[in-house]
Amino acid sequence: MILDDYSKFLDIITNKVNEFGIDVSKYNLDHFGYQTSSDQDYDRLLPEFNKVAKLLSEEIVGGRRVGIFKFYSPLIYKNKPIEAVELVAPKQGQVYPSALEHAEFVVDTDLETFANKYPDLPWDKSKIDQPMFPMVNLKLGEFVQAKFHLKPVLEIIKNKNIFEILIMANSPQIKIV
């Protein structure tokens, strides 16, 4: 399976982030992501991901499909469970190899304060004000990055689904009997 090397990949990510002076051992490694090279590759990999995890959400984010899966049995990394994984299609015109691409950590402070602890790092703050899933990114290589956000992705998906249900229940076109 394509996720078999997740532990080696996460070692690379955590070592590179630690080299930048960020001790990620104190943060929850929430999930990691697999970037596909094409929409066709995304479709080809969906059944493989479905063997080990349940698709909870598939949204268009930044012009591309992003599937969020919950593992049937959490993966273990450094004695801690990882419950989720993302499958990400490329944006129109972007060229990526199909490979593990990022890891995401939940931080314990607001994102601006977190990034300001490390002012000399090349932070990408372009998504810091996203309403649903704000984050800051740190590029670690050509096709590898670490992302830092405020809440676990499964909590965000759950809250989003509850919000959508409430919107639908209060819609004037829908009558609840």
Image (cartoon, rainbow, N blue to C red):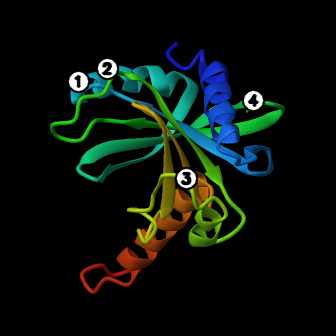
Which of the 4 image quarters holds residue 114? Answer: bottom right
The 10 Å Cα crowd at callout 1, few under 14, some 14 to 19, many 20 or more, is: few
**CB atoms at circles 2 and 1 under 8 Å apart?**
yes
Q: Amino acid at mark 4?
A: Ile
Determine the residue positioned at 55% across, 31% down.
Answer: 53
Q: Which mark is residue 121?
A: 3
Please give the residue where the numbered disc 1 appears in the rendered image: 40
- Judging by the rendered image, the residue that carries numbered circle 4 is 76
The type of residue carrying mark 3 is: Leu
Structural distance between the alpha carbons of marks 2 and 1:
6 Å
Which disc is residue 44 wearing?
2
Residue beneath the point at 68% across and 37% down: 19
Q: Is residue 167 rendered to the left or right of residue 13?
A: left
Residue 97 rendering spot, x and y as whole percentages = 33, 22
Looking at the rendered image, the disc whose residue lies closer to the viewer, 1 or 3, is 3
- Mark 4 or mark 3: which comes first in sequence? 4
